[in-house]
Image (cartoon, helix red, strand yellow):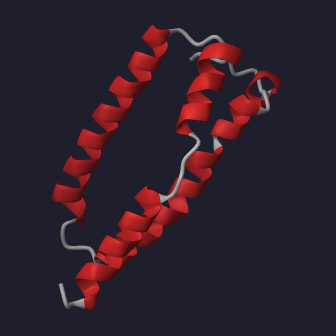
Amino acid sequence: VKRKSVWLPALFIFLWQATPTSESAFFYFLTNEIKVQPEFLGRIRLGSGIASLVGVWVFQTFLKDVRISSIMFWISILSVPLGLTQLLLIFHWNRQLGIPDEI
């Protein structure tokens, strides 16, 4: 673990996962404010699991030879706009755009 190329990405992932999230507050918002049904939340979890498996396949198939620093950079860049999509529900902008609360 003396190699900087190993511990620096590991430290980045640790710090990213160790930071607090709003998951429990968002769950409360979805179930109590928007009245999302448990079945729909289960479908979201299923879709998340399938997306994780597809991500592993994409990495093994296409990204195995790409530098990890490049992968981490693009993951960080892409995660920001994807994470901000929750604001559509929180501020009810989805309704103004004609997108229902449950798709």
Residue at 38% across, 26% down: 45
Residue at 36% across, 74% down: 11
Tell me: 22 left or right of 49.
Answer: right
Q: Compared to 27, does 59 lie above or below?
A: below
Asked whether 35 or 98 is in front, the reply is 35
Is residue 34 visible from the viewing direction of this image? no
Tell me: 55 left or right of 84.
Answer: left
Tell me: 38 left or right of 14.
Answer: right
Asked whether 53 or 4 is in front, the reply is 4
Location of residue 15 (image quadrant): bottom left
Identify the image quadrant of the C terminus.
Answer: top right
Residue at 53% across, 8% down: 37
Rendering coords of residue 8 (x, y %): 34, 81
Rendering coords of residue 58 (x, y %): 25, 52
Total count of labels: 0
Rendering coords of residue 33 (x, y %): 71, 17
Identify the image quadrant of the N terminus.
Answer: bottom left
Residue at 33% across, 38% down: 51
Tell me: 24 left or right of 63.
Answer: right
Q: Residue furthest right?
A: 96
Is residue 19 visible from the viewing direction of this image? yes
Rendering coords of residue 4 (x, y %): 28, 89
